[in-house]
Image (tube, rainbow, N blue to C red):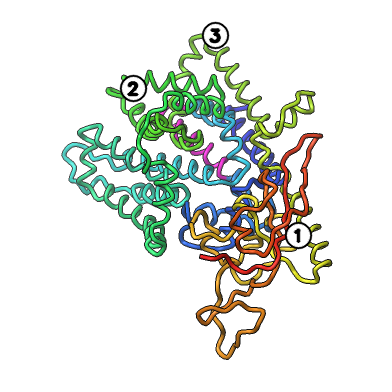
Amino acid sequence: MNPKRWLFSALAILTLLRVWMTGCMELAPDESYYYLWSQHPDICYFSKGPGVAAAIRIGTDLIGPTERGVRLLSPLLSLGTSLLMFLMARRLFSEQVAVWTALAMNFLPILQVGSVVMTIDPLSIFFWTAAMFTFWLAIEKSHPEEGENLGAGWSFWWLATGALIGAGFLCKWTNAMQLVSILAVLLSGRRLRRHFFQPGFWLMLLVFLVFLLPPLLWNAQHQWITFEHLTHRGGLKEPFRIHIGEPFAFLGAHAGVYSPLLFIAILMTLWRAVPRAKDHFKPRFLLAFSLPLLLLYLFLSLKKAGEANWTAPAMVSAGILATADWYERARRSAGVRRFLGIGLGFGLVLSVLVMNIDLLRSAGLPYPYRRDPTTRLRGWQTAAEAVEKVRTEREKALGAPLFLIANGRGVASSVGFYLKEKRMEGPGHPPIYTPESQAIEDQFAFWPKYDQFVAFKPGQRPVDSLFTEEGGFNPFHGRSALFISDSDDDSAPSAITGGFEKAELIACLDLERRGWRVRQIRIFECTNYHSRSL
């Protein structure tokens, strides 16, 4: 069979397998959290743009609010990324390099995860790859020859590039770094700098600015909370102190999620490509879409190591470049072929294990769940069933309905997704609340809460059971709740005890799998809500 047809057949089968796998695992807390976003459509959210919420809404509208519905687009985005990398590598190098590029990409453990779960990363990587490809087409199709007028450099691909960068930006802010990559490419040669005097480049920026408007408008209405969040998360307000071990932790994390030998191969290619880029445009182009992001996070890791997935978009162009480099070396050396074969094989093993670490336990290896990153995808449905059972029992005893509070967004989102009976206390309310707080820590702060006052309707009178203040009332006043926590603390936090007459631990549930504890859930009964004192 022709290698290209073999590749496309393999990608089709792999995509079908991934679509099936999307329904075989529970949602991770982030996925459940983003699902809640999709049920509250907005032009922006507390920490990210609307891209991931829109993607989940499309999937759940098509096939329902299930695990597979939430993740439906993830395998399709991965397939799109593989095909775009194939097209890019074929245009820059050869069809053989393109086949191996798309194949090797699917051996990376981090991209296996991103092909099944729905977070911002599969969206970000897809739009990053698409924008890089259309930018190549833009400069290829519109590059003016000597003596041509400046208008000869126009191409539709400039508009497409601006739109794709903008769409990626609405999924993950990191995608705006592609503008830096584009500037680096255009500044790298005299003929390329002529694009600064053509309409294409400026129209690309104009299109991107259209996508910049929703986050700016939303943040202008919400005290620029996203910028405050990003500043705090990046530790930019803290003094810059170098921690010598952090860069090694940063590189070690990358070696783990990209497969150690394959990551070493990529680093070796980047090292060799830098001097070649001075005289050759192709490595210069690909380096421009990898080095700025990699160096930025490597520099930030001097203070604190970031997550390995933050640099994932940079690995697209680095992967194409590495495949082209090692393909030529493999043709000349049996030793290189063995090295790459071992690297791909190890990457495949890691990819399989990262999707199902229970394979180690089935083989008799006692791998504890506390060290298992896939533990976050387990136990939530069981936890929701336990919460509903306790709620039903307590409501029968009390003769009154209980509302639910969780100790954080992860537990609230995950347990809330798996509740069979989602009781929304009002329009726009989540099924489970987070504790009342004056701080804005996540998207729950922007949805209706149990400590909010509601204005009286015309002609409505306050009654004794309603706590009134300034012409409004709190409909939760005097009610009782269940507080759900995955903390090891046997006492409820002050945010709960300060708002209820009492908070008593009534259940401590060990959620187990294969004889190992996955997590522990504590349930507190909170009596007579009266609102916290300011």
Residue 494 sits in which quadrant? bottom right
Under circle 3, the secondary element is helix
- Residue 86 lies within the magenta run: yes
Across and down, in percent, residue 170 comes to 45, 52
Residue 204 in sight: yes
Tell me what residue is drawn at x 60 percent, y 40 percent: 115
Under circle 2, the secondary element is helix
Under circle 1, the secondary element is loop
Nearest the eye: 212 or 300 = 300
Q: Alpha-carbon distance for marks 1 and 2?
A: 56 Å
**Secondary structure mostly taken by the magenta-highlighted segment of the chain:** helix
Q: Mark 3 and mark 2 in contact (Cβ < 8 Å)?
A: no
Circle nearer the viewer, 2 or 3: 2
At label 1, counting other C-alpha atoms closer than 10 Å, the crowd grade (few under 14, some 14-19, many 20 or more) is few
Residue 2 sits in which quadrant? top right
Q: Residue furthest left?
A: 147
Q: Mark 3 and mark 1 in contact (Cβ < 8 Å)?
A: no
Q: Quadrant of the N terminus?
A: top right
Q: Residue furthest bottom?
A: 459
Residue 525: numbered disc? none
At label 2, counting other C-alpha atoms closer than 10 Å, the crowd grade (few under 14, some 14-19, many 20 or more) is few
Q: Amino acid at mark 2?
A: Val
Q: Which residue is mark 3?
A: 334
Tell me what residue is drawn at x 50 percent, y 13 percent: 331
Residue 140 sits in which quadrant? top left
Q: Which residue is mark 2?
A: 274
Residue 420: numbered disc? 1
Left/right of residue 349 with respect to residue 385 in the rendered view? left
